[in-house]
Amino acid sequence: MIHKANDISTDAVTIQGLRFAYPGSGAALGEIDIGLKRGKTLALLGPSGCGKTTLLRLIAGLLAPTQGRIWFAGTPVADAATGAFVPPERRNLGMVFQDYALWPHLTVAGNVAFPLEMRGLGRAERDGRVKAALARVGLSTYAERRVSDMSGGQQQRVAIARATVAEPDLVLFDEPLSNLDRELRETMVGELASLVAQLGLTALYVTHDQSEAFSLAHEVAVMRGGKIEQLAPPENLADQPGSAAVAEFLRLGAVVAVTKGEGGWRLPGTDIRLPEPPIGNPRRVLIPSRDVRPGEGPLNLTGQVRASVFRGDGHLITFHVGPADAGFDLSFVAPNRAAIGAEIALHIDPAVLRWFAE
Ligand SMILES: Nc1ncnc2c1ncn2[C@@H]1O[C@H](COP(=O)(O)OP(=O)(O)OP(=O)(O)O)[C@@H](O)[C@H]1O
Ligand SMILES: [Mg+2]
């Protein structure tokens, strides 16, 4: 699996102590440690500007680190201390970008054949490989079409075929689906996941979309402000967010400040008493949306409905707990619509609360 960097000899990619600053500006990244095993996919997930593309460009060799080292399969490709640096074309990579970056004047086959030409493969082998790559992405009958005459989804399939045709050691994806509409994006996420598995690719996948990261990756690095906040399998992130920031970014529920008064810990603006926290000096607590249940229980969260929005798989209900000028909002998915302003009685098992000290 992917782990904190400690086993360079068996990793496909190892990153240790990586820092990067664009010339003339403050630190964009630091400090990053990653170990990615062969055949695994790591998603870099985070809001705009958190440094995802910068990290991918460092791995690609389009930027050189300010500090730290990167290894591919145990071989250093960048080392700020020694100045060692392997250029992108010698890193055996495939890359897929948001804007496809195809050559519009070439045919589909011409685009896909390009990395093979760069590697000096003969015509017959090239044709065979291009055919196979196009078949994998369902574009066999489009080989002679001009790329400019194809839809966004088709163009992205061409880009994926081009990135994988030369059987690279590592494929880098930078928000490859974000220009597509939602329905196509959902289809392509599934297609990409099976293609990556079928080819046994090692992949880094940049996205700001949590559902994309969760459906594609074995592990997800949640990034914020140039750092990795938490790196874990998707299930663990949802069950055990490592910080309030991760819980908020993943929209796992309400993250609310807690106060200690007479008689113990309370939720803000309410007289709802919390159980004794498992950590010293807690500052905030996560009330996970998925664990909110109707009716009364040991920890009741009575509130007033503020919004009820139909989402296809249910109604996203936002209710306010506590007085209007204090308290907090909590959202959850329910099978039925709720009337705005209605009082509802909900409860949660105190054991599912997660406490944070920061
Ligand atoms: N060429 C550049 N020169 C100076 N600063 C840059 C440059 N490119 C990016 N930055 C800054 O570095 C930080 C990280 O940018 P980066 O593009 O890596 O973010 P990102 O996570 O990919 O964001 P997005 O989701 O919007 O693509 C940002 O603060 C950005 O303004
Ligand atoms: Mg980016």
Image (cartoon, rainbow, N blue to C red):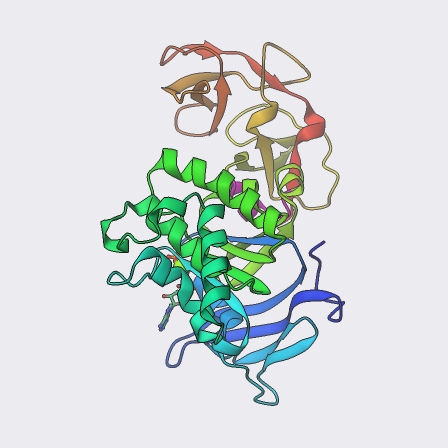
Residue 51 locus on image (x, y percent) = 46, 63
Q: Nearer the viewer, residue 329 or 242?
A: 242
For the point 44% across and 74% down, which residue is it? 118
Q: Nearer the viewer, residue 41 or 122?
A: 122
* Residue 140, above or below 96: above
What segment carries the magenta color? Answer: 241-250
Residue 72 visible here: yes
Horizontal relation, residue 259 to residue 175: left or right: right
For the point 49% across and 21% down, which residue is it? 333
Residue 149 locus on image (x, y percent) = 23, 50
* Residue 220, above or below 319: below
Residue 13, image quadrant: bottom right
Q: Does the stretch in magenta take in 267?
A: no
For the point 70% across and 61% down, which residue is it? 4
Farthest-out residue, bottom: 82
Which secondary structure class fits the magenta region best? helix
